Image (tube, helix red, strand yellow):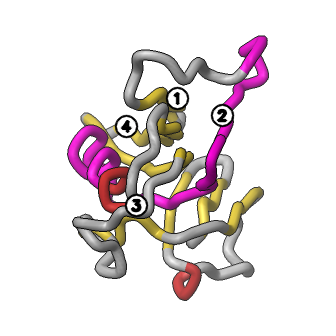
Amino acid sequence: GFLALSSENAVVLKADNYDPNNSYSCAIQSGPMLLIENNVNIQFDKNSKNKNFRIGVGVYEQKGEKFIVFASSNVPVTFYQFALLFLTKYKCSNALNLESGSYCSLKTPSAKKPFSKTRIVCNYLYFQLK
């Protein structure tokens, strides 16, 4: 999938739906897709034992405003569990896994160090599009 950004919009979309001729100023390709059109990716097993730290991104709308949310798990989770976060907490229709592994780090330019991995199940950042 792709996270594609323009000066006025942000979308998470399946790789098949990405048009490089569109007016996106930036696009990131990664995967797998966590959510596709309000559904957890059908490739994910609810009972999977494959747990890793994960970082993902989704786009959601609230009261006519659009937001980009980046989330980082603080404990190992399955793709299915991570997808549910974007579906239930943020009501994203599409979400993309950006990174998975034994250690993942999410850092912002203003943060002096990556988010702490203690006591919190998941850290997140969100940005409002204007």
Q: Which residue is mark 3?
A: 79
| Foreground: disc 1 or disc 4 | 1
For marks 2 and 1, the one nearer the N-term is 2
| Residue type, numbered disc 1 | Leu
For marks 4 and 3, the one nearer the N-term is 4
| Residue type, numbered disc 2 | Leu
| Foreground: disc 2 or disc 1 | 2
Q: Which residue is mark 1?
A: 125
Note whether 106 is above or below 78 in the view shown.
above
| Residue type, numbered disc 4 | Glu
Residue placed most toward the observer, 117 or 18: 117
Q: Which residue is mark 4?
A: 65
| Residue type, numbered disc 3 | Phe
What is the number of the mark on residue 106?
2
Residue 76 position, x and y percent, is 46, 44
Residue farthest along the front direction in this orientation: 49
